[in-house]
Structures are given as C-alpha cells and as structure tokens.
C-alpha cells in the first residue's frame, strides 16, 4: 500500500469529477446535432434530486434487489483505489489487475441478480444480453492487459502504466496502438455507449443496460448512476494511461495530463456516438470478437519484443 497523500489524488479526482463525464459526452453530441443540450453538470443535479427522494420496493423482490446497487457501487469504488492515475495507486501489489477484473465482474453480477430478482421477463432479457456481451468483451480486456504486462514485464497496474514511457512507445508502438483500440471498443461496450448500446433509448426490444435498472428509484438509482459514471472514469483512465506515456516530469503535471486524457476520451466517445448508428444486436458479438482478435495480435507483437514478467 502507498500511504503518501498524493497517491489519493487519483481516487479523489474520480469521486468528484466522474459525474462530469456523461455531461461532456452529451455536450459533444449536442454540438454535432446543433443543439444546446443538457447542462454540463446535469448528472450532479440528478444525483442530488434522487438522493432526496424515497425508494419504492415491490413485494416480489428480496434483499438482493436492495443490495445490488450498494454492492455495485462499493466494488467499483474499491476498484478506483487500485487504478493508477498520474502516479501509483493507493493500493498496488503484484497481480492487482486480476482483482480489478474480479471487482468489475462482481459489480456486473449483482446488477444482473438485482434485475432478475424483480421477476420481470423484460429485465431478465436485459440481464441475459448484459451477460452475453460481457462474455465476449472480457477476453479482449484480459488479453490486452496480458500484452501490456508482457511489454512492461510487470504484473501490477501501477507498474504497468509507469513503464509506458516515450521509449516504450517508440519501440512498441504497434502493440500499444492495438491495445488502445481494443480498450476503446471495450469502453463503449462496458459503459453502454453507441454503437453497442444507447443510454438514451426508450425502445424496449433494444435496451440492454437501461432495462436492468428500470425498477430502481431514489437513492438506489442514484447509486447506479454514480457507479456508471465511476466505471466510465475507470475505463477512460485505463485508455489515457496507455495513450499518454509517462514523461519524467512533476506529479501535478502527470495528474493534469491524465485528467486531460480522460476528458479527451469522453470527447471521442461523444463524437463516435454522433457519427455512428447503433449496431444490430447480432453484430455486437462480431465487434467484440474482433476486438479480442486485435488484442491477441497485440499480445503476439508484445511477445516478440516485450519483457517477461
């Protein structure tokens, strides 16, 4: 564990600014559509409004329905303290990337279980799609970070991102570019963004993530929205950590560079959502399998020039 104060700056920035990211994406989409769009801080307003309301629970639900949002939020918040942001993470150890994957898997599991606990076939349909598409996305994520571990010779996320230097980019640019592309696709899939999912859709037969949380309200729904924002921050941090090499500069400059990288990732996400249509459901597995294939190519390239952990 890292106990210096500046190591806590990464999680602090995520906790404070994560709700800003959906607002940036919406503003970019509004710009392309020629509209003003919702306020940049709209999610902050929504969270405060939901926290001031009460929750309504169906008599057919059990404690799993109530525990789902709490456990989802707790696991993603715990993962935030393992993700490096500008410097080493507060919690860093060999193999910590596996713990992050399991925490994200646990968050998805309890979201799915809470949806199925309602007894609604509609929410069960969304839960089934969520599990199916995650099964296609996770191999690409694992393989990509295996490639990063091979390139850097490290098995800790903090060590991996600190080892992505300009010199490594010069020597292993193809593998790093492929890794960034794979993470970009998985970011869209894991955060229910176009072309995989549409967070603003109201067409029942095409909903994936949104359909699973329809029965939640009040503080429970606030936790779900906040967890989604934190998850977007987490994946954007991963992407920025690969794209932005670690220069030998001051710690504040590294934090600033990473923050700008996260904002740029959201701008690119909003641009993609503005210029692309949503894929047909049958095409989404093909996209995710293609991302996994690119990750495998990145791993093969890393094996040729990387360092064994």
Image (cartoon, grey):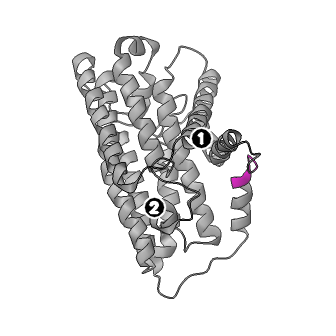
Lateral position of residue 287 relative to residue 82, left or right: left
Quarter of the image for residue 121 reads bottom left
Q: Is residue 56 left or right of residue 117?
A: right
Q: Is residue 206 above or below residue 254?
A: below
Residue at 29 percent across and 37 percent down: it is 143
In the displayed structure, does residue 223 sit left or right of residue 179? Answer: right
Residue 144 against residue 176 in the figure, above or below: below
Q: Which residues fall within the magenta stretch?
A: 39-43
Callout 1: helix, strand or loop?
A: helix
Q: In the rendered structure, which disc, 1 or 2, sits on the residue that comes first in sequence?
A: 2
In the image, 125 versus 16, the foreground residue is 125
Q: Which residue is mark 2?
A: 208
Cα distance, mark 1 to mark 2? 19 Å
Residue 146 vs residue 159, the one in the foreground: 146
Query: What percent of the width, then of the height, locates residue 194?
Result: 50, 48
The residue singled out by tag 1 in the image is 270
Q: What x and y, as percent, mark residue 114?
A: 45, 71
């Amino acid at each position: 564990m890292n106990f210096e104060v500046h190591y806590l700056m990464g999680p602090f920035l995520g906790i404070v600014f994560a709700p800003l990211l959906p607002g940036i994406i919406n503003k970019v989409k509004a710009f392309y559509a020629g509209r003003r769009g919702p306020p940049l801080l709209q999610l902050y307003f929504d969270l405060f409004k939901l926290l001031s309301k009460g929750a309504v629970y169906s008599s057919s639900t059990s404690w799993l329905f109530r525990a789902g949002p709490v456990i989802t939020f707790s696991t993603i918040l715990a993962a935030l303290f393992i993700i490096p942001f500008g410097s080493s993470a507060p919690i860093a150890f060999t193999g910590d990337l596996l713990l992050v994957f399991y925490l994200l898997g646990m968050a998805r599991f309890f979201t799915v279980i809470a949806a199925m606990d309602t007894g609604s076939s509609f929410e069960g349909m969304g839960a089934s799609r969520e599990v199916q598409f995650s099964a296609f996305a996770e191999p690409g994520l694992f393989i990509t970070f295996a490639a990063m571990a091979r390139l850097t010779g490290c098995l800790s996320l903090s060590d991996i991102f600190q080892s992505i230097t300009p010199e490594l980019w010069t020597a292993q640019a193809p593998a790093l570019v492929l890794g960034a592309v794979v993470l970009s696709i998985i970011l869209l899939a894991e955060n229910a963004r176009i072309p995989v999912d549409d967070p603003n859709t109201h067409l029942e037969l095409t909903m994936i993530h949104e359909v699973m949380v329809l029965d939640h309200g009040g503080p429970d729904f606030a936790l779900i929205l906040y967890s989604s924002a934190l998850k977007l921050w987490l994946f954007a941090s991963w992407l920025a950590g690969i794209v932005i090499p670690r220069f030998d500069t001051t710690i504040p400059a590294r934090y600033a560079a990473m923050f700008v990288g996260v904002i740029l990732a959201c701008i690119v996400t909003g641009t993609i959502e503005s210029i692309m249509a949503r894929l047909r459901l049958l095409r989404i597995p093909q996209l995710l399998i293609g991302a996994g294939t690119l990750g495998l190519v990145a791993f093969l390239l890393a094996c040729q020039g990387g360092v064994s952990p």
